[in-house]
Amino acid sequence: MDTVKNILSTSFSLALARAYPTICDADAMIQLAKQPQFGDYQANFAMVMAKRIKQAPYDVARRVVQQLGTSDVWDKLEIAGPGFINISLSDAFLQTRLQLLLSDNRLGIPLSTSPQVVVVDYSGANVAKEMHVGHLRSSIIGDTIARVLDFQGHRVTRQNHVGDWGTQFGMLIEYMIQTKQQDTATRQITELNALYKQAKQKFDVDEDFATRARARVVALQGDDKQTTEIWKGLVAISKEHFNDIFTRLGIGLRDEHIRGESFYNDRLADLTQELEHDALARVDQGALVVELEGFIDRDDNPLPLLVRKSDGGYLYATTDLAAAKFRIEVLGADRIVYVTDARQAQHFAMVFAVLDKAGWVSEQVSLEHVSFGSMLGKDKKPFKTRSGEMISLASLLDEASERAARVLRDKNSDLSSTEVVTLASNIGVAALKYADLKTERIKDYMFSWERMIAFEGNTAPYLLNAYVRILSVFRKGCLTLQEVVEAGGRIVITNGRERELAIRLLELPDVVETLGKELLPHRLCNYLYALASTYHRFYEACPVLLADTIELQHSRLALSALTAQSLKQGLELLGIHTVDKM
Ligand code: ARG
């Protein structure tokens, strides 16, 4: 099923080609109308085209409108301002499209015609440390991206690039052995956190310990039995911790998605040799570096990418080069999406540049750093506890459900206490995720329990409640959502409120399509909020069960069902599950 935007784009592109046969690459630039009073959609190509062919935009627009003639899709095309074309869709078109949506369980969201293999690299927490808010954002945003691309029919490979290798493990393991705490069987992640801190302190002051820690790294790399055993124990505890968080958060990452830094360790020697051999890298004071154009350090000196230290050790970037190569060559990736905070922007830019320079990535493969800002506390500083510690995700999740439970109890006394508990954990998680996703990801955002748990405004509780309210309309009519959908009432547009809702409902496929390209989840959030508000206005103005005629009642029930389904599907793509009452 084609989206409204695509249907309009096709008609307009054909007309453009007929009006200007020598120009074959013009885009009709169709978008939803900025000001609904002038139309539903608009085409903005005339200004761009006019510049190219040195004519007045108004004349360009008129010529294309003449070519367009009449159609079932629109009632009216109007040229406004310098050359915008306002498009008013016909009620007949809206009705037919909505009827199609009603019988389509994808709600008109198209499957990609050219499905890709997409690697989504997200979460990426570090072994032996508790996950913190940075990993929370990556997990939430990455999971949404994976869900959306999956739904579009792409072959998504989720990769959890955990930090499970490097000098810090030599330090931690050595410390555990020295203090006779190497038994990992019963240890908790929080204890590892503490041990890690102690080990680091010792490492910084105790030269002898530092030397032994370095030797321990060599032992780990050399597969020494005792060292490897402890390391495996650390990995196992961490995995359990990650899985626990993922389950609670409803994040689709499992053990099979973990391909940590250690996985690539064996490939680093060959990789750096290849760079050296092809004269792409050179030795500089014992270290191996790749020179790159366009990167400078703080003092404006050229900044190369370091791929091997003078002591022979490899770096985070070296591993990322190996990982990208593996994903392209072995996993067959057409697109790799890295979800990390914005501070890693330069790291990825440099890694991408080296991949390009070495010819390891063809032009068909797209590498994208999906970056995000920080989560800030009320003091506008990075979100921490009062004592300045990182806030653990586990405690954040506990607080989310406690707060949601409180709000539920205040609002609705009909719920049993078990209902409150189950609902609260779902709503708490939903609120937490949604607050993160609704901000344009590149911006920092301020963490506020009050705002995210509120039933008013652009929040998860508001959207979940909008869904619940539609279900309760059905319940009053002794119907279920399923029954209304299956009845497939004939949709008729009889007033402006119905029309406004119709236009919104038909927009979802385009919103999802854009999301798959731009990877900006806040656009979907804004859409869902607009949809819920539009439904609210419709509901205030248009009696559903008490409509004047039975035909009208069926039509409005169908519009309500489509709204409920769109909310459910949209939230599902954000990794949020709807509830049936609250
Ligand atoms: N472990 C890294 C960190 O905590 C994130 C890994 C992101 N993925 C990657 N391929 N570098 O910052």
Image: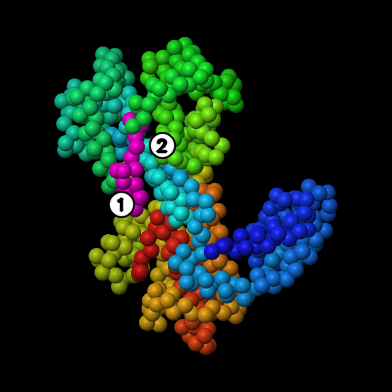
- 246 above or below 172? below
Q: Position of residue 346 (x, y in %)?
A: 51, 31
The quarter holding residue 423 reads bottom left
Residue projecting furthest to the top: 285
**What is the quadrant of residue 392 in the picture?**
top left
**Label 2 beta carbon within 8 A of ligand 1:** no
Quadrant of picture, ligand 1: top left
State which tag comes first along the sequence, 1 or 2: 1
Marks 1 & 2, CB-CB < 8 Å contact? no
Q: Within 8 Å: ligand 1 and the Cβ of disc 1?
A: no
Q: In this picture, which residue range is highlighted in magenta?
A: 245-262
Q: Residue drawn 59% across and 21% down?
A: 300
Query: Where is 120 relative to 477, above or below?
Result: above
Identified by mark 2, the residue type is Val
Report if residue 537 is visible in the image: no
The residue labelled by disc 2 is 330
Judge left or right: residue 82 versus residue 308: right
Q: Position of residue 430 (x, y in %)?
A: 38, 57
Q: Which residue is mark 1?
A: 248
Task: Check disc 2: other Cα within 10 Å, few if <14, some if 14-19, many if 20+.
Answer: few
Left or right of residue 186, residue 106 in this image: right
SS at mark 1? helix
User: Who is closer to the viewer here, 45 or 280?
Assistant: 280
> In the image, is 21 to the left or to the right of 379?
right
Q: Residue at x 16, y 36 (%)?
A: 185
Residue 327, given in percent of the width and then of the height, sits at 43, 37
